[in-house]
Every structure is written in C-alpha cells, then in structure tokens.
C-alpha cells in the first residue's frame, strides 16, 4: 500500500472513531453527480464529528426511481447502498438536476404537455424510495434536498458535452424557473412526510436575473455543476441545522 493510501486509510479510521466517541451522526447521501459536494464537505472535514458518505449515481433522476428498467438502475443501487451502509442513521436524498435539465423537458415534448406538469411524476419516484426505505429501515431519519440552479448560460448550450443536454433549447431563466418549481414540490413532499428539507437556491440566485450568480459557477471550465468550494458552506450550514433539530427531537 502506498503512503498516500495508507494515510487516507488512517484518516478514515480516525474519523470513524471520532464520530463514535463524540456520538456524531453517520449521514448517507443518495443522489446524482451533484451530490459530490457532500464528498467535498467530508474531505474538508467541514461537518466534524459527523461522517458523510455519498452514493452517487450519475444521470439518476427522481422520475427514474419509478422505473425498475431505467438506464441508471438508480432505485436498485440506492436500495443496495441503504443495505450496505446500514449503520448510517441519517439519509439525505438529493435528485432533480437531471430531471430539470432535460428529462422533464423531453417528456413534456413527447406528451405535448407543460413541462411543469411533469413534476408530480418525479415526486412519485422520490415517494417510492421513501416508502420502500420506511418499510425496511423505519429507524432511519430521512432528509430531502432541493437541487441546484442551472449553471449553463444561453450561449453555452451548444457547448455542452452531452447531446441530451444540448437538445433542450429552454433559456437559463426558464430552466431555473423549473428548478424552483421542482424544489417547491420536493419541499411540499418533505412537509407531507414530516421530513426536513435542504435548499440553497435563495443563497445562490441572482434576484435581478432569476438565475444562479456567477460566483457559484465552476470557473475553470464549462460545467453543469456548481462550484463545490463556493457552495459547500451553504450545504454544511443546512445540514448542521437539521442535525441540531434532530438532537432536539424536532423530527
């Protein structure tokens, strides 16, 4: 084993011991690639003494959780993760960027319907995962998180790597409005289930333009993710609030 891997192994062991000794929470994140910000939070030790582990399924959608034959097989992968990390007591579900970037737009076009009319189906996918988890892991605490505001500007659509993302011609403002509506539906679902809700849209949006502020973009390249370094403090603050509420027995 190289020194780098040995050092990383020791660090993980130390953090696990610290979490146990200081009675921290073990937090499992179920999400798409945007959940990588939580890995950043763990790597930078921003949420000590708690542990964080992210089960990231690239391209996963909320709506896809209702489809056992989806390309990503996200529902089955999240099931496996919940079993594999059975000692993690808090679970955060964060999906929606892929839904709002092209999945809902394409579905609306195929059905000749409003894109906003596609949101309830996406919520059914999240509800299905919550129902299954509640049946098999009733002792675990679940948290729902809203997705991020779109980062791709109107003149950058054709520069995106993935063809599916290039296929949606909606403006950044239109895509942002969809995200806000999607997140509101997630917030309502959380309220119906008595679950906490996390969202950093208000901290990252430009009130004048209705889109994400440039300071939260990845500066080095064109990227549909937000800057992890810039947004991690907001997600950390949100998680700390939720964990405080948990300790106070508020949910």
Image (spheres, grey):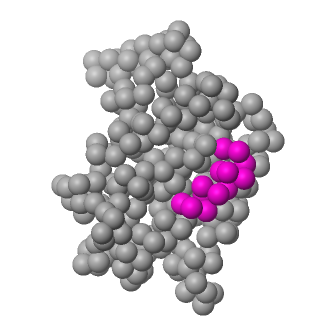
With respect to residue 35, does 7 lie above or below?
A: above
Decide if residue 198 is on the left or right side of residue 212. right
Majority secondary structure in the magenta region: helix
Decide if residue 158 is on the left or right side of residue 109. left
**Residue 18 among those drawn in magenta:** no
Q: Nearer the viewer, residue 71 or 56?
A: 56
Image location (x, y in percent) of residue 87: 64, 25
> Residue at the spot x=24%, y=60% of the render?
214
Residue at the far right in the pictured view: 135
Q: Is residue 70 visible?
A: no
> Residue at the spot x=28%, y=54% of the render?
216
Image location (x, y in percent) of residue 143: 60, 42
Where does the magenta region start and end? 183-195
Image location (x, y in percent) of residue 5: 34, 23
> Residue at the spot x=54%, y=60% of the render?
183
> Residue at the spot x=77%, y=35% of the render?
138
Q: Is residue 127 visible?
A: yes
Q: Quadrant of the N terminus?
A: top left
Image location (x, y in percent) of residue 248: 62, 25
Residue at the far front in the pictured view: 208
**Residue 193 among those drawn in magenta:** yes
């Amino acid at each position: 084993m190289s020194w780098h891997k040995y050092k990383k192994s020791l660090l993980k062991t130390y953090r696990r011991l610290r979490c146990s000794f200081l009675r921290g929470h073990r937090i499992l994140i179920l999400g798409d690639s945007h959940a990588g910000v939580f890995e950043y939070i763990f790597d930078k030790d921003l949420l000590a003494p708690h542990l964080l582990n992210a089960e990231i399924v690239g391209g996963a959608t909320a709506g896809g959780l209702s489809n056992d034959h989806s390309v990503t097989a996200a529902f089955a992968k999240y099931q496996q993760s919940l079993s594999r990390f059975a000692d993690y007591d808090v679970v955060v579900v964060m999906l929606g960027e892929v839904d709002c970037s092209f999945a809902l737009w394409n579905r609306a076009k195929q059905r000749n319907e409003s894109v906003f009319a596609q949101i309830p189906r996406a919520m059914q996918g999240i509800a299905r995962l919550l129902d299954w988890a509640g049946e098999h892991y009733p002792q675990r605490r679940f948290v729902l998180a809203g997705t991020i505001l779109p980062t791709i500007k109107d003149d950058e659509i054709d520069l995106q790597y993935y063809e599916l993302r290039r296929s949606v011609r909606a403006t950044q403002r239109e895509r942002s409005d969809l995200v806000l509506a999607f997140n509101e539906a997630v917030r309502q679902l959380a309220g119906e289930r008595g679950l906490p809700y996390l969202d950093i849209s208000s901290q990252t949006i430009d009130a004048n333009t209705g889109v994400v502020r440039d300071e939260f973009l990845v500066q080095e390249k064109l990227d549909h993710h937000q800057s992890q370094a810039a947004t991690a403090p907001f997600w950390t603050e949100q998680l700390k609030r939720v964990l405080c509420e948990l300790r106070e027995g508020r949910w």
